[in-house]
Image: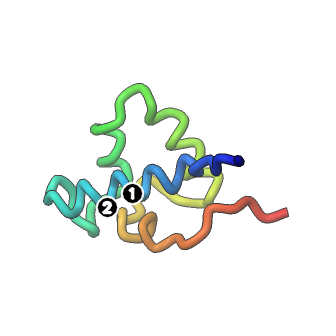
Amino acid sequence: MSQQVIHPMVKLQRQVQKLIDSKVLKPTDSIWKIALLYGDDWSFLKQELLAYDFTMQDPVSELLAVESWEDEE
């Protein structure tokens, strides 16, 4: 039985969607606002986002719009 590992960015997308649903964040808020909520985990997540060509000024709606986080080979 193989377990599928959830990509960290998929996990982040789900958490950000919950924050939007609960009105903590707005889709138009900048990604940097997520940093305030993630504390110690933010360093890793920020590096991942930058690797996918996001800037901290991009709206969180762009993060949620990504359909696949697979690394292209």
Residue 34: x %, y % from top left: 33, 46
In the rendering, which numbered label is found on residue 30? none
Image-based side of 73 in relation to 13, left or right: right
Residue 61: x %, y % from top left: 36, 70
In the rendering, which numbered label is found on residue 17? 2
Looking at this rendering, what residue extends furthest in the right direction?
Answer: 73
The residue nearer to you, when weighing 48 against 13, is 13
Within 10 angstroms of label 1, few (less than 14), some, or many (20 or more) residues?
few
Image-based side of 56 in relation to 30, left or right: right
Looking at this rendering, what residue extends furthest in the top direction?
Answer: 40
Q: Amino acid at mark 2?
A: Gln
Q: Quadrant of residue 19?
A: bottom left
CA gap, disc 1 and disc 2: 5 Å
Residue 12: x %, y % from top left: 44, 51
Q: Secondary structure at mark 2?
A: helix
Q: Secondary structure at mark 1?
A: helix
Number of labelled discs? 2
Looking at this rendering, what residue extends furthest in the left direction?
Answer: 23
Within 10 angstroms of label 2, few (less than 14), some, or many (20 or more) residues?
many
The residue nearer to you, when weighing 61 against 14, is 14
Q: Quadrant of residue 63?
A: bottom left
Q: Residue at x 46, y 73 (%)?
A: 65
Residue 31: x %, y % from top left: 37, 54
Q: What residue does disc 1 label?
A: 14
Quadrant of the drawing holding the C terminus? bottom right
Eyeballing the image, is 39 above or below 52?
above
> Mark 2 and mark 1 in contact (Cβ < 8 Å)?
yes
Eyeballing the image, is 3 above or below 55?
above
Q: Amino acid at mark 1?
A: Arg
Q: Residue at x 50, y 33 (%)?
A: 43
Q: Residue at x 35, y 51 (%)?
A: 15
Q: Residue at x 30, y 48 (%)?
A: 33
